Image (tube, grey):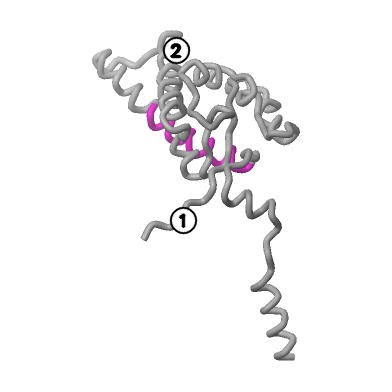
Amino acid sequence: LSRLKHEFKSRREHHIRPTFIQNMASVAYPAGLPRRLAAATYDVLLLVALWFVASAIVIVMRHGEAVPAGTLWFEAYLLTVAYLCFGWFWTHGGQTLGMRAWRLQVRRADGETISWLQALRRYLSAYLSWLSIIGILWCLFDDQRRAWHDILSGSETVVLPKQPPVN
């Protein structure tokens, strides 16, 4: 019995991972739906906090008076704040805080960061993707795992390889 345990353990320790898994561990690969949703959850929390700060600034400027519900300029202001937040992250390294936590990166197909124009197209088309749900689920059917906002902005969302620990 101990000989069988030793043989099993030896085989398990010397098991070679398939090549595609080895490659995935060292090269960026297209992001799947679960990671996208996890990163989006983190980013929504960041965005809500940012909107609280942005709203507080407006309330202070209005001398404590609240903005009436449905005020178009205020809604446009909050959407602009969100665009500037996401756009800055995407154009400066391709990672929001949620994406960094899940090792995701938005980039062009050549690996470079996206432009502000691409960020705008991505931001606007992301509303279509998220509101329709189909646009996000599209990454389950696309051979490159792209959602609609990836396709419409000419970008891709990839999982970055794990970095070795720093000593």
Quadrant for the N terminus, please.
Answer: bottom right
Write down the residue under mark 2: 76
Residue 40 belongs to magenta span:
yes
Question: Which region of the structure is painted magenta?
Answer: 34-50
* Image x and y of residue 111, in percent: 53, 32
Q: Could you tell me which secondary element the residue under label 2 belongs to?
A: helix
Write down the residue under mark 1: 164
Residue at 62%, 19% in the rendered image = 152
> Which SS type dominates the magenta stretch?
helix
Q: Quadrant of residue 10?
A: bottom right
Q: Is residue 88 above or below residue 29?
A: above
Q: Would residue 166 appear left or right of 5 to someone viewing this image?
A: left
Question: Is tag 2's residue or tag 1's residue first in the polypeptide sequence?
Answer: 2
Residue at 54%, 35% in the rendered image = 40
C-alpha separation, residue under disc 2 versus residue under disc 1: 43 Å
Q: How many marks?
A: 2
Q: Would residue 162 appear left or right of 11 to someone viewing this image?
A: left
Q: Nearer the viewer, residue 78 or 23?
A: 23
Q: Quadrant of residue 27?
A: top right
Q: Would residue 119 appear left or right of 30 to someone viewing this image?
A: left
Q: Nearer the viewer, residue 144 or 127?
A: 144
Residue at 61%, 26% in the rendered image = 150
* Image x and y of residue 121, in percent: 55, 17
